[in-house]
Amino acid sequence: MSKEYGYIGKEVTQAFRSNKGIFTPQDIIELDQENKWTNFGQLELIETVTLASGSPANTLDFSANNLTPYNVHFITYHSLINSGNAEVGFRFYESGVLESGSVYDYALQYGTTGGSFGESRSQTNPRAKFGDLSTASTESCNGYAYLYNLTDSTKYSFYTFHNHRTGQMEFGSGVLDQASEITQIQVCVASGNFSGTLSLYGIRFA
Amino acid sequence: MGLLQVSTNTVTSAVASVTLTGINSDDVYMLTINNFVPSTDAQDFKIRVVESGSPNSTSNYDYAHKLLRSDTTYNNTSATNQTSFDGTSSTGNATGECSNGIFYIYNANNSSEFTYFTQEVVLASHTTLLAGFQGGGVFTSASQVEGVQIFPGTDNIQSGTFTLFKII
C-alpha cells in the first residue's frame, strides 16, 4: 500500500500532531490504530487484564512501560472476588521497582444497604486501597478509578475511585506521596487470591 | 464512551483565572483538573459558569461535599446561594502538593434547566495531607451555559492543566 498520501514519488512520515497529505478513510483507520492520527481528547484503551475464577492469584500486573504519554489514567474493573474478604488496592512500580512498603495514603467513605456508614483511612498502608472484596460470586466488586501524574517523575501519584459490591458502596481518594515516575501498575489483595477483570485507559491531553 | 476535547489550557506562569468554553450541545461534559497549584499556599479553586462570554457571579451556587482525609474524621461542607462552586480544599504549593480531579457537567447547554456538577477531587494539602473532596453542586439558574471559569480562592493559579471534554 502506498504511503505517499497524495505526494508523488515521496514517502511521507505521519505522526500525532503532524499529518500531511491526502488521506483515504483506510489511511485514517490505519493511522489511528498506530496512534499517528491527530485526534485530541481520546480515551484510549491501553490494556485489559483478567484473572479467571479458576486461576485466581494474589497479584495481577498490567504490562510494564505502557503508561505514557498520558497525564490522566482511567481504570474500570468488574467481577473482583476474593477468597478472604480482603482489601484490594494498587501498588506502583517506580522506574521498574515495585513499591511494596507501607507508604500509601488513602481515605474512603463506605455505606451499606443496611444503613451502616463509616470511614476508613490510613497514612501507612501497604497498597493504594480502592475497595474491600467479598468471597461470594454474587457479591463481586465493580467500579472505576482515575489516576493522576503517574508518568511525571516530579509529582506525587494520586487517585480517586468509586466502587460497589452487593450491599456496600465505597468512594475515596489516595496518594503515593513520593515524587517518582510510575512505569507499571499492580493490583493486589491483602490476603488470599482474587479473580476479576480490569481495563486500563489513558486520557490523552487531559 | 468516547471523549472529544473541547478546550484546554495549561498554566505555566501565574494567572488569575482560566476560562474554558465550547459547551454547545446537550451532551454531558467532563472537566479534568490536573496539577492545580495555587500561587498562595493553602488555597482552593472555585468554579463559575460562563454565559455569553462572561462568568456568572450571582448567588446561585449550591453544593454539598464530603472532605475525606487520611488523618482524622471527615468533614461535611455544604452551602447554598454562594457566588461560586467550591472545587477543592486547602491545596498546598510545595513540591508535590496539588489538586487533581474530574467534574461531570450536566444540562449546561439547556436554557430551561439548571446546570449540575458532580466531582471527585484528590489533593495534597498545605501540610501534605492526603484528602479527597467528593460531592456535587448545582447552578440554580435556568440558563444556557457555554463553559466554566476556574480561579483560586485568593491570588493566582500558579500552574495546572484544565481541560474540557464532551462525552460522545
Image (spheres, rainbow, N blue to C red):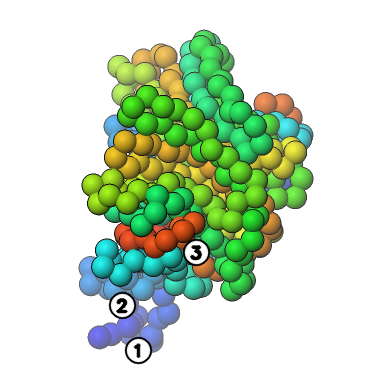
CA–CA distance between discs 1 and 2?
9 Å
Q: Amino acid at mark 2?
A: Gly
Foreground disc of the pair 3, 2: 3
The circle on residue A185 is 3
**Circle 3 chain:** A
Query: Which quadrant is the N terminus of chain A positioned in?
Result: bottom left
Does B84 appear above or below A169? above
CA–CA distance between discs 3 and 1?
45 Å
Question: In the picture, residue A153 is in which quadrant?
Answer: bottom right
Foreground disc of the pair 3, 1: 3
In the rendered structure, the answer to whether residue A64 lies left or right of residue A176 reads left
CA–CA distance between discs 3 and 2?
42 Å
Does A107 appear above or below B57? below
Pointer 1 local density, CA inside 10 Å: few below 14, some 14–19, many at least 20: few
Residue situated in front as seen by the camera: A54 or A70: A54
Question: In the picture, residue A8 is in which quadrant?
Answer: bottom left
Q: Tell me the residue at 30%/70% (across/down).
A: A55
**Element carrying mark 1:** loop
Q: Where does label 1 land, which residue? A: A9
* x, y percent for residue B26: 29, 32
Q: Tell me the residue at 39%/67% (across/down).
A: A57
Q: Amino acid at mark 3?
A: Ile
Q: Where does label 2 land, which residue? A: A6
